[in-house]
Image (cartoon, helix red, strand yellow):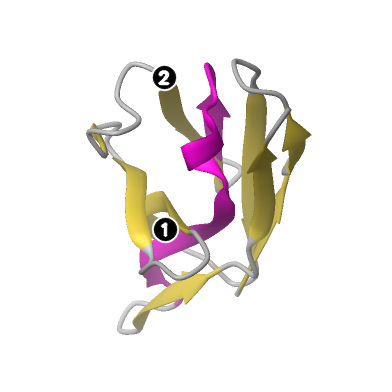
Amino acid sequence: VQLVESGGGLVQPGGSLRLSCAASGSILSINIMGWYRQAPGKQRELVAYVTSGGSTDYADSVKGRFTISRDNAKNVVYLQMNSLKPEDTAVYYCNAEGVLVSETSEYDYWGQGTQVTVSS
């Protein structure tokens, strides 16, 4: 199973970016898909997640600005980021938790990360 992220880049404060993460491989289902981020010198933190049933949760720092969504049929998760701030600058990692690859095997996976830089 591979997770491939796209959509990162450089954006000015107040701008928007949309991250995508596609999971590929022998996948029967994915329980939770989410986004984490890690800024230089800081620990990796949860940004947002969405369950297979569509429930979502967000870090307080991004509530009202970021929106997470997923396409279960395509095993893709999106993160729409609006009103970006310099403190959102980080490497953003896609996470897939509870990936069912067979009737008895379930694993967690990470993407390679995509850089988001918010700067004027």
Indicate whether 12 appears above or below 30.
above
The residue under the point 53% across, 34% down is 79
Do the residues under discs 1 and 2 have CB atoms within 8 angstroms?
no
In the rendered view, does 111 fall on the left or right side of 70? right
Q: How far is disc 1 from disc 2 in space, using C-alphas?
A: 28 Å
Residue 65: mark in rendering: 2
SS at mark 2?
loop
Q: Earlier in the sequence, mark 1 or mark 2?
A: 1
Label 1 neighbour load within 10 Å: few <14, some 14-19, many 20+: some
- Chief SS of the magenta region: strand
Quadrant holding the N terminus:
bottom right
Indicate whether 29 appears above or below 47.
below
- Residue 98: where, in percent of width, then height? 32, 67
Which residue carries the number 1 mark?
29
- Residue 103: where, in percent of width, then height? 34, 77
The residue under the point 68% across, 54% down is 115
